[in-house]
Amino acid sequence: MTVPESDSTDRPEQEVVKEPAAHTEIQWLLLKLGVDMGFGVWVARNDRSRSFNGHRFSELPALKSSLPLQFDDATNRTIELIDVLWLDRNAIVAAFEIESTTSIYSGLLRMADLVAMQPNLNIPLFLVAPEERREKVFAEVNRPTFSRLDPRLAEICRYISFDALRERLAQVKDFVRYLKPDFLEDLSEACELDQE
């Protein structure tokens, strides 16, 4: 089984220009939230040199240098490119793909590859995107390609808007260390469309 490597050169030029500010901010917020909640964190291998507001991702005290060894090489190659992971010892607690560019396929494909290679994996998967991209995220995650997975990608992925994340973090900043990952359930919404 082969999982293609991420290639930043195949992005349209407007995506390369548009992505860094919002993507990096949200990635930092999720990393910092995970650390503040007491988790180890993983940032995508190709994003480790990024920084936000003078804070280098690589300097986070709980940033892991390697992933848990419970998966095969193909799965690990997929997981190491997911934007943000929260880790509790050797267990992945949550996975986040941030979609701020025109095409949302790279993150969806990583999530789909993970589900296809590890169908019994029970990890909350979150797609984090601007509110104006919500409909696009829902339409894409419900495509027939992703609906043929077992479980279907739309069944296990949840959506969080950038604004909802920012607002909730402002509300919980004084007691964030007491939060548990399931608080994301209230913050997020199911990606599955009603089949009427």
Image (tube, grey):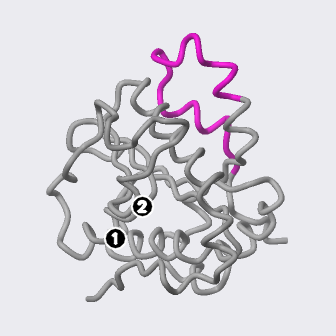
Q: Is residue 171 magenta?
A: yes
Which quadrant would the N terminus be assigned to in this image?
Answer: bottom left
Q: Which mark is residue 78?
A: 1
Q: Is residue 177 magenta?
A: yes
Q: What whole-number distance in Å separates the C-alpha atoms at marks 2 and 1?
A: 7 Å
Say above or below: 127 vs 35: below
Q: Position of residue 94 (x, y in %)?
A: 43, 46
Pointer 2 with pointer 1, Cβ within 8 A: yes
Say left or right for 27 vs 88: right
In this view, the residue farthest toward the left is 69
Say above or below: 63 vs 123: above
Residue plotted at (49% across, 36% down): 54
Q: Which mark is residue 82?
A: 2
In this view, the residue farthest toward the front is 54
Number of numbered discs on residues: 2
Residue plotted at (74% across, 54% down): 130
| Near-viewer residue (120 or 103) | 103
Quarter occupied by residue 133: bottom right
Q: Which residues are magenta?
A: 168-189
Query: Helix, strand, or loop for circle 1?
Result: helix
